[in-house]
Amino acid sequence: MGAESFTVLVVCQGNVNRSALGAVLLERWVDWYLPSPLRAQVEVTSAGLGAPVGAPMGPRARVIAEALGADGSGHRASQITEGMIRAADLVLVSSTRQRGSVLDLVPGSVRSTFTMREAGRIAATLPTMPAPSSVEELRLRVASLAENRATPGDRSGGDDIVDPEGKDDEAYREMARQQVPPLARLAQVLFGMPRGEVAAYDAAAEAAEFSFNSETAGSAGPAGSTQARPRGRRQV
């Protein structure tokens, strides 16, 4: 957490599916939506509470990432450390239990640590904002999330994202449905993602037309289909 930098840490258990997907999406959105030179001051990292260190992103999670315009090819799993938590301006976890585990390690991170679904729910109650112009403005937006933690919102789906590891294709589709929309709402508040593109990610996640037949990244839906790929102003 340097004075001239802003760090997001995304956490799950193994750092090969949920946190890996979250990190590569946020990295892409930093590049698309933040102005230069601010984007060079923002770092998105990820880690697992019990990571197989060095493992690549799970093949089906990578299919989802690439269908949504991100690149998971360079991801390698990392084990979380206290130092990583202390260095982060924002910590996003995949479940309430993991939030507790992070706070057990660094209790002082309570105001900057959220489940992804919680952060998205809070973000949905905040006014639409243009892209920030400074690191300080990003930190103020995280502070606003903390200040509005008790604000009523739709909690019907809970705060946890399903762990798809070892499960079937539908579990990965459900992971995308639970994870992508709240991250897009968070990106609207943090990075200025346009409302229309938030809606496009909602639709893509709900449709979940990801083809896992060969578990090869780069496949999104039936041959020739682009329905799973949002087509915003930054997408090619």
Image (cartoon, rainbow, N blue to C red):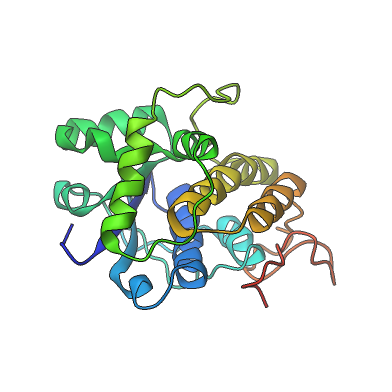
Numbered-mark total: 0
Q: Is residue 204 visible?
A: yes
Q: Position of residue 17 (x, y in %)?
A: 49, 51
Q: Position of residue 42 (x, y in %)?
A: 32, 66
Quarter of the figure that contains the N terminus:
bottom left
Query: Which residue appears at 66% of the width and 64% of the height?
Result: 67
Q: Position of residue 146 (x, y in %)?
A: 33, 34
Query: Which residue appears at 50% of the width and 55% of the height?
Result: 21
Query: Which residue appears at 44% of the width and 68% of the height?
Result: 34
Closest to the observer, 99 or 90: 90
Q: Is residue 8 visible?
A: no
Relative to 187, is 33 above or below?
below
Q: Position of residue 39 (x, y in %)?
A: 37, 71
Relative to 59, is 206 above or below?
above
Relative to 156, is 126 above or below?
below
Query: Which residue appears at 19% of the width and 49% of the height?
Result: 81
- Left/right placement of residue 84 relative to residue 169 reads left
- Determine which quarter of the picture holds residue 99: top left
Closest to the observer, 10 or 186: 186
